[in-house]
Image (tube, rainbow, N blue to C red):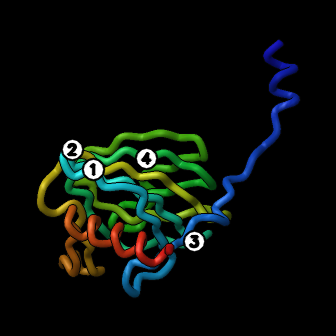
Amino acid sequence: MATAVAANAGSYAFDDRNIRWYKLGDFEHFEFAMLDVDVPQRIVDFLGKFAANQRIFLHRHLAPTTTLVLQGEHRMYEPTRKIKEVHSAGSYTSHPSDDTHRDGAAAQDAVVYYSVRGKDGTLFEIFDDNMNVIITLGIDDFISTLNDQKKDSR
């Protein structure tokens, strides 16, 4: 029975035509769309989109983060640019805080759902190639961005 069901199951692509993607400053190969910020629980939810065959900026997560790959293959790279992890569409993962890496995609754009959990203060640090912090992002930045994106979508 499982074979018959598997044989009839099609492959479905994630349809992001109704999602308005935004750039993060001048950074290339990455776009995002805010979904929600639960202020009392300190939870930030957003979608990230990584350009095919590219890597993004080096950064560190300072709060536990869960991800669900919706499209493509999400790749995580060590600061040295060596592949650290690869997650296919449908993969759900939990990452502890203090995880420094670059994200990227394989031959197709990758779309990943992120849920950043329960932390005040700084949630992400973005580094230059010499490991100097050039940007910090906290929950207030995500609240502001969510509000801006809501205004922009009207």
Q: Give the mark toward the camera: 3 or 2.
A: 2
Q: Give the mark toward the camera: 4 or 1.
A: 1
- Which is nearer the N-term, disc 3 or disc 2? 2
- Residue to which mark 4 is pinned: 67
- Which is nearer the N-term, disc 3 or disc 4? 3
- Asked whether disc 4 touches disc 2, contact meaning CB atoms under 8 Å apart, the reply is no
Q: Position of residue 72 (x, y in %)?
A: 63, 55
Amino acid beneath label 3: Ala
Side of 116 relative to 67 (left or right): left
- Residue to which mark 3 is pinned: 51
- Which is nearer the N-term, disc 4 or disc 2? 2
Amino acid beneath label 2: Gln
State the mark number for residue 41.
Answer: 2
Q: CA distance from mark 1 to mark 2?
A: 6 Å
Amino acid beneath label 1: Asp
Residue drawn 20% across the image and 56% down it: 62
Q: CA distance from mark 4 to mark 2?
A: 18 Å
Specify few, some or many for label 2: CA neighbours under 10 Å numbering under 14, 14-19, or 20 or more.
Answer: few
Side of 86 relative to 5 (left or right): left
- Asked whether disc 3 touches disc 4, contact meaning CB atoms under 8 Å apart, the reply is no
Q: CA distance from mark 1 to mark 3?
A: 28 Å
- Extreme residue in the top direction: 1
Image quadrant where one finds the N terminus = top right
- Asked whether disc 1 touches disc 2, contact meaning CB atoms under 8 Å apart, the reply is yes
Q: CA distance from mark 4 to mark 1?
A: 17 Å
- Asked whether disc 4 touches disc 1, contact meaning CB atoms under 8 Å apart, the reply is no
Specify few, some or many for label 4: CA neighbours under 10 Å numbering under 14, 14-19, or 20 or more.
Answer: many
- Residue to which mark 1 is pinned: 38
Q: Position of residue 139 (x, y in %)?
A: 21, 62
Specify few, some or many for label 1: CA neighbours under 10 Å numbering under 14, 14-19, or 20 or more.
Answer: few
Amino acid beneath label 4: Thr
